[in-house]
Image: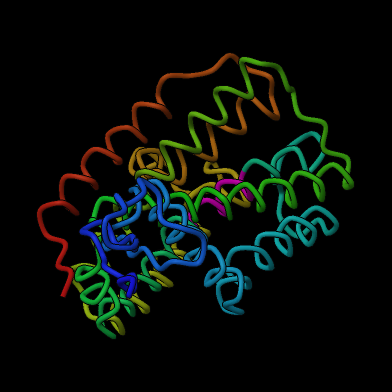
């Protein structure tokens, strides 16, 4: 009587018959578990996609990041409510509204969202996953940049329809991108600092208050020379003012890129990152 073949499993999870060496690759249809974390770039990409979907599905976020900037651009371009100086009104408004869009996404929306994620324990549970904290911050940054790209397309298209003709060249475009990246780093660091140190309700109130104050005093929708001269040096050192003035000088006026806005934003980004890294609490 011949001996019946028996199944056996090797350490790699492949199966074979007794006396037959196991194959290097599992046979088709054979379960081969691989209990290990995915590569970091795939985890970051997956988390960034989820963060982006959450932001785009949130009606309040869309109102803050898309609707309000577009309403300000169209409303103040069409009506002479404010004295914006000589030249087409949209030439002054478009760079300021672009700066406001960066503020709304990188600071206000991110501060409120992260504050409530911390309150509901989302950050604590994400800390138990293989995704490192640096990966989570990278994913949030990528989602913010994706929303900002969408904002820039919508705002620039609307401004172009209103007659905006910016001074575009390789130098001005590169300078504008540099300013936006520095501003995103500064606003994101300040948002994480606020969300990581205050309660969620306090973060909600403070982030909206900062948004309204900077909208009125940051040179977004009307020139700073309409304000008292004593407060101008302080206002010119704000990140929203540096971003709006820098974008306006090269896109609307065609002036050479200036170092002052870059320096202001770089200082805010470095200081905000240092403070957020020191005081941010994940739980």
**Residue 116: image location, x then y, percent:** 33, 80
**Considering only vertical position in the picture, is 252 above or below 36?**
above
Q: Is residue 16 above or below residue 146?
A: below
Q: Is residue 1 above or below residue 271?
A: below
Q: Is residue 208 magenta?
A: no
Say whether residue 240 is left or right of residue 127. right
Write down the quadrant of residue 176 in the picture.
top right
* Image-quadrant location for residue 33: bottom left
Percent from the top left, x then y, of residue 161? 89, 46
Q: Of residues 188 and 45, which is closer to you in this image?
A: 45
Q: Can the viewer see residue 229 in this picture?
A: yes
Which x, y percent locates residue 256?
58, 14
> Outermost residue toward the front?
1
The residue sitting at 39% across, 73% down in the picture is 112
Colour option used: rainbow
Q: Nearer the viewer, residue 266 or 44?
A: 44
Left or right: 140 as drawn, with respect to 220? left
Q: Residue at x 38, y 69 (%)?
A: 207
Tell me: 36 left or right of 24. Answer: left
- Residue 236 appears in which quarter of the rendering? top left
In screen coordinates, is 185 left or right of 101?
A: left
Query: Which residue range is magenta in the image?
Result: 96-104
Position of residue 129 relative to residue 231, above or below, is below
């Amino acid at each position: 009587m011949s001996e019946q073949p028996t199944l056996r499993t090797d350490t790699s999870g492949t199966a074979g018959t007794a006396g037959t060496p196991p194959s290097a690759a599992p046979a088709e249809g054979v379960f081969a578990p691989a209990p290990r974390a995915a590569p970091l770039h795939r985890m970051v990409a997956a988390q960034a996609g989820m963060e982006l979907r959450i932001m785009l599905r949130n009606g309040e976020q869309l109102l803050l990041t898309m609707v309000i900037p577009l309403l300000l651009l169209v409303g103040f371009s069409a009506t002479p409510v404010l004295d914006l100086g000589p030249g087409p009104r949209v030439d002054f408004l478009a760079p300021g509204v672009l700066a406001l869009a960066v503020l709304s996404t990188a600071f206000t929306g991110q501060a409120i969202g992260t504050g409530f994620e911390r309150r509901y324990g989302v950050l604590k549970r994400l800390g138990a996953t293989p995704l490192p904290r640096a990966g989570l911050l990278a994913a949030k940054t990528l989602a913010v940049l994706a929303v900002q790209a969408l904002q820039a397309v919508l705002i620039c298209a609307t401004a172009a329809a209103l007659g905006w003709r910016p001074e575009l060249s390789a130098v001005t475009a590169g300078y504008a991108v540099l300013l936006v990246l520095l501003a995103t780093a500064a606003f994101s660091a300040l948002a994480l600092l606020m969300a990581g140190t205050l309660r969620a309700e306090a973060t909600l109130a403070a982030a909206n208050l900062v948004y309204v104050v900077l909208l009125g005093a940051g040179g977004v929708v009307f020139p700073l020379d309409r304000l008292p001269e004593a407060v101008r040096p302080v206002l010119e050192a704000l990140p929203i003012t540096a971003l709006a003035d820098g974008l306006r000088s090269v896109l609307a006026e065609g002036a050479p890129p200036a170092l002052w806005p870059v320096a202001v934003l770089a200082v805010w980004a470095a200081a905000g990152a240092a403070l957020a890294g020191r005081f941010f609490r994940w739980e």
